[in-house]
Structures are given as C-alpha cells and as structure tokens.
C-alpha cells in the first residue's frame, strides 16, 4: 500500500499539528464570539434608541503603587486622580467631541 496522498508523502505528525492548529483557531474564534456576546449583554443597559451606546467617562487614578482607570462612580476617598482638573476638563471636551463624531458616523 502506498504512503502517498495527493502526490505528497503522508505524514501523521504533520496532520496532527494541522489538526491542533485548526482546533486552536476554532477555540480562539469561539472565545472572541463569546466575549462579544458577553460584552453586548454587559453594556445593554446603556443602549440608546438610535442603536448606539451611552458613553462612560473614566478617570485615571493612583491607588498605592498602581495606576488604574475607573468609572467616576467607583472613585474612593483616598484615590489620587492623575490629571489635574483643567487638564481633565479639556480632555473631557476632546473625548466628548470625538465620541460625538464617532457616534454620528455610526448612524
């Protein structure tokens, strides 16, 4: 019996590696799909009538040795905000403008 498949020598190890690669790709795709579904569920409370989502503002704070982005509602009394108020206000204006442009083009 010939050990040839489509003019190439049959190699069980290569076939096994190809199958493992296919399974990894399939698992990655399933993970991304599940992540997307969970993310959509998580943000569903912010869904607006036009199909876009209400934006959430984040703050960069220093907590001990670590910097962390948080929601304004999660601000703790001993958090040290990284950006000064004038810088934050200017950044917020730019962020809100960018979000408005983005949301306008999503419609």
Image (spheres, grey):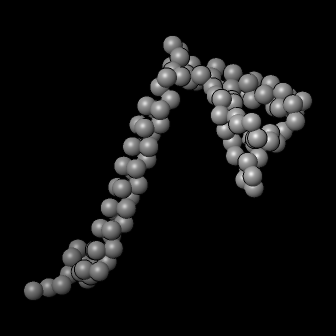
Residue 105 can be seen, yes or no: no
> Measuring 69% from the left and 21% from the top, which residue is drawn there?
100
- Asked if residue 65 is positioned above or below residue 58 in the image, the reply reads below
How many marks do you count on the picture? 0
Report whether 53 appears left or right of 21. Answer: right
> Measuring 20% from the left and 81% from the top, which residue is drawn there?
4
Residue pushed farthest top? 49
Residue pushed farthest left? 1
Instruction: Locate the C terminus and report the quarter of the image it occupies.
Output: top right
Report whether 41 appears left or right of 13. Answer: right
- Asked if residue 14 is positioned above or below residue 58 in the image, the reply reads below
The x and y percentages for residue 78 are: 76, 41
User: Residue 54 versus residue 78: which sits nearer the camera?
Assistant: 78
Residue 54 can be seen, yes or no: yes
> Measuring 74% from the left and 36% from the top, which residue is drawn there?
77
- Asked if residue 3 is positioned above or below residue 71 in the image, the reply reads below
> Measuring 18% from the left and 84% from the top, which residue is drawn there?
3
Report whether 27 appears left or right of 11. Answer: right
Instruction: Locate the N terminus and report the quarter of the image it occupies.
Output: bottom left
Residue pushed farthest right? 86
Report whether 17 appears left or right of 85. Answer: left
The x and y percentages for residue 95 are: 75, 29
Name the quadrant containing residue 70.
Answer: top right
The x and y percentages for residue 71 are: 66, 33
User: Residue 33 versus residue 105: which sits nearer the camera?
Assistant: 33
């Amino acid at each position: 019996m010939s050990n040839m498949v489509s003019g190439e020598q049959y190699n069980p190890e290569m076939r096994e590696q190809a199958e493992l690669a296919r399974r990894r790709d399939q698992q990655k795709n399933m993970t991304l799909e599940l992540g997307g579904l969970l993310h959509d569920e998580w943000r569903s409370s912010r869904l607006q009538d036009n199909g876009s989502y209400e934006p959430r503002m984040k703050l960069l704070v220093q907590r001990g040795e670590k910097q962390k982005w948080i929601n304004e509602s999660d601000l703790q009394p001993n958090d040290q905000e990284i950006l000064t108020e004038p810088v934050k206000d200017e950044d917020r204006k730019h962020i809100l403008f960018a979000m408005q442009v983005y949301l306008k083009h999503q419609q």
